[in-house]
Amino acid sequence: MSKEHPYSTAETAREERSTAVTSRHDWHTDESLAVDVVTAVATAVDSAPTELESLYATIDPDALETVLRSDRNDEQLSERRRVSFEYAGRVVTVRSDGVITVSTRGRTRGEGDE
C-alpha cells in the first residue's frame, strides 16, 4: 500500500494560483516599468529588489516598455497587449494597461483575464 501525499495535486495547484502578486505600473509617472516589475517580483519571492538578478539578464526592459507603451494611444488595444517571461523563478506578465502579474511557473495570464 502506498502512502498518500497529504495534499492533492488540485489543492497544490489552487494554492500556487492564489500566490500571484498583482501590481500596476502608472504610465503617467517618471517611474520606470523595469523598477515596478522588479519590485513586484521581489514582493512575490519575499526578497529585496537588490537581491534579484538584473532584469536585463532576462529581458530588455527598454524594449518591453517600448512594446507596451506603443499601444497607449489606442484604448482598444491598450488592454490587450501583454508580454510574459520568466524571471527569478516566476512567470511575469505585463500588460499595456500597466497590470503586472507575478505567479508561479505554469500560469502566464494576468489576474482578471477571461
Image (spheres, rainbow, N blue to C red):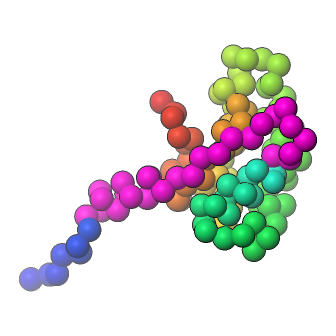
| Horizontal relation, residue 106 to residue 78: left or right | left
Q: Quadrant of the N terminus?
A: bottom left
Q: Give whichever of 72, 48 is nearer the camera.
A: 48
Q: Give whichever of 85, 34 is nearer the camera.
A: 34
- What is the x, y in percent for residue 89? 61, 66
- What is the x, y in percent for residue 19? 48, 56
69 magenta-colored: no
Residue drawn at x 81%, y 46% is: 33
Q: Quadrant of residue 99?
A: top right
Residue drawn at x 83%, y 41% is: 65
- What is the x, y in percent for residue 76? 69, 16
| Horizontal relation, residue 99 to residue 13: left or right | right
| Horizontal relation, residue 19 to residue 85: left or right | left
Residue drawn at x 43%, y 58% is: 16
Which stretch is magenta? 8-33
32 magenta-colored: yes
Q: Give whichever of 20, 71 is nearer the camera.
A: 20
Above or below — where is 69 with respect to 58? above
- What is the x, y in percent for residue 93? 64, 46
Above or below — where is 42 with respect to 69? below
Residue drawn at x 69%, y 41% is: 24
